Amino acid sequence: MKLSARNQIPGTITAIEKGATTSHVSIDIGGAIVMASITNEAVADLGLAPGKRAYAVIKASDVMVGVEG
């Protein structure tokens, strides 16, 4: 797999919550969970399932910061 995104973090899928058109895929990246929202079609095409190894690929032009007030 070759991608332009520099942040490619290996992990294991822990859960997939399917909605009407979009699924939320949770990936354990070593004690932290990263969640991705992708289409149900992509879940099927990639053969995603809990326990399967996958990469969290993060490419963003902005990072927001929040604090508790």
Image (cartoon, helix red, strand yellow):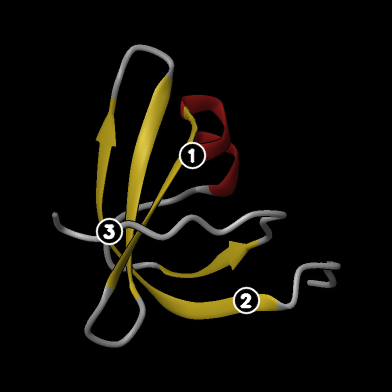
Q: Mark 2 = which residue?
A: 8
Q: Secondary structure at mark 3?
A: loop
Other-residue count near label 2 (Cα within 10 Å), few / some / many at <14 / 14–19 / ≥20:
some
Q: Which mark is residue 18?
A: none
Q: Which residue is mark 1?
A: 43
- Amino acid type indicated by mark 1: Val
Q: Quadrant of residue 26?
A: bottom left
Query: Mark 1, residues whose alpha carbon is within 10 Å: few (<14), some, or many (≥20)?
Result: some
* Residue located at (15% from left, 58% from top): 68
The answer for how far apart the CA atoms under marks 1 and 2 are is: 18 Å
Q: Which one is earlier in the sequence, the residue at label 1 or at label 2? A: 2
Q: Residue at x 29, y 28 (%)?
A: 18
Q: Is residue 2 toward the left or the right of residue 40 in the image?
A: right
User: Observer-nearest residue: 18 or 7?
Assistant: 7
Q: Is residue 19 above or below residue 59?
A: above
Cβ–Cβ under 8 Å for marks 3 and 1: no
10 Å crowding of disc 3: few (<14), some (14-19), many (20+): few
Q: Position of residue 38 (x, y in %)?
A: 50, 36
Amino acid type indicated by mark 3:
Pro
Q: Quadrant of the C terminus?
A: bottom left
